[in-house]
Image (cartoon, rainbow, N blue to C red):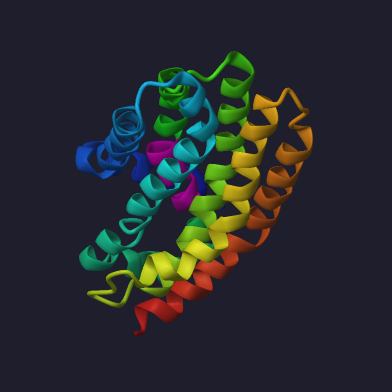
Amino acid sequence: MFSAFFTLMQYEIKITLRLAYSWLTPLLFFVIVVSLFPFAVGPDPILLLKIAPGILWVSALLAILISIDHLFRDDAQTGYLDLLLLSPHPLSLLMLSKIFAHWLTHCLPLIIISPLLGFLLHLPANEEYALVMSLLLGTPVLILLGAIGAALVVGIRSHGLLLPILIMPLYVPVLIFGTGALMAASLNQPINGYLAIMAVLLLLSLAFAPFLTGMALRIGVNQ
């Protein structure tokens, strides 16, 4: 099973890296949206510092939302998804492998570049640390929860805004505690409580989301 897990993960990473638009689009969207805010609200460092947590987290959330739409859609069109459903290996394990590969190729670049964008918004070192740690804990939760919604609508050709409507309410707790960690860091307060809650959300998502994604995928394919 673990051999299948790593084999599928390597395959997903190779395919994604070959299709540059797949992982570059969310990254460029994240950079462009964050970079436009100083032009929109002005170069005042105090104002930018106040709104930086919301800017960074909402931009990251929207960038991930863009990438989630492609999680299963291309596989469904090529028939690769049917092979995964017919695999003798546990479907939840295969979904976890696919989701983890998606996080590595789409979310990790966002996290790596986020300190540079934080510097653009005049974030001090302690807030940069809070930003990176909250993104490390929060982005996997966003991908795991988003995979459930993407699996449900995989059989619908023109789902439009159905996917965001399904999964955006699930993203609210992550957004609250992610921005809360940055706001606490800006006030020189401890952020361990926020990070601990996000770690709990991550563990719960790891425990249930792959299984629910597999169930949703069987439902979505049959639509």
Q: Residue furthest top?
A: 125
For the point 29% across and 63% down, which residue is it?
A: 73
Return the residue nearer the eye: 46 or 182. 46
For residue 149, side relative to residue 71 (left or right): right
* 110 inside magenta stretch: no
Return the residue nearer the eye: 208 or 38. 38
Q: Main secondary structure of the magenta part?
A: helix
Spot occupied by residue 36 in the image (x, y as percentages of width and height): 29, 32
Q: Quadrant of the C terminus?
A: bottom left
Part of the protein shown in magenta:
97-107
Residue 11 placement: quadrant: top left
Return the residue nearer the eye: 169 or 217. 169
For the point 52% across and 74% down, which residue is it?
A: 215
Residue 38 placement: quadrant: top left
For residue 69, side relative to residue 216 (left or right): left
Residue 67 visible to the viewer: yes
